[in-house]
């Protein structure tokens, strides 16, 4: 069900683009949410959800600089 609720923003054959989950700065309990997402690969239910999404390795943290690079790259590819 989770995969059907996601929408593709852009597709590319470049290996530089990956799944990205952004969390709003003032999101309540952001740290708890981030830790839950980053630890999905540590239990059976989380592993199953990640497998359904096609990303069995799970999520990894991304720096703000890397996120800005990804946004610039996507904008360039859309132009």
Image (cartoon, helix red, strand yellow):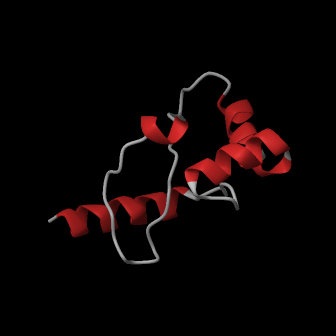
- The correct choice, above or below, for 34 with respect to 63 in the image is above
**Residue depicted at x 39% and y 78%:** 14
Name the spot of residue 54 as percent of width and height, x first.
58, 57
**Residue depicted at x 44% and y 35%:** 5
Name the spot of residue 59 as percent of width and height, x first.
65, 54
Q: Return the residue nearer the eye: 8 or 1.
A: 1
Question: Image check: 63 left or right of 15?
Answer: right
Residue reaching furthest to the right: 43
Question: Image check: 39 left or right of 71?
Answer: right
Quadrant for residue 35, please give it: top right
**Residue depicted at x 52% and y 56%:** 64
Quadrant for residue 61, please give it: bottom right
Residue reaching furthest to the bottom: 14
Residue reaching furthest to the top: 28
Question: Image check: 15 left or right of 52?
Answer: left
**Residue depicted at x 50% and y 43%:** 22
Name the spot of residue 75 as percent of width and height, x first.
25, 61
Name the spot of residue 12 as percent of width and height, x first.
34, 70
- The correct choice, above or below, for 60 with respect to 16 in the image is above
Q: How many marks?
A: 0
Quadrant that contains the C terminus: bottom left
């Amino acid at each position: 069900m989770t995969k059907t609720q996601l929408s593709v923003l852009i597709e590319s054959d470049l290996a530089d683009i990956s799944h990205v989950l952004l969390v709003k700065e003032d999101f309540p309990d952001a740290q708890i949410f981030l830790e839950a997402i980053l630890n999905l690969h540590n239990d059976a239910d989380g592993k199953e959800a990640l497998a359904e999404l096609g990303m069995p390795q799970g999520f990894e943290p991304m720096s703000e600089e890397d996120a800005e690079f990804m946004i610039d790259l996507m904008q360039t590819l859309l132009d």
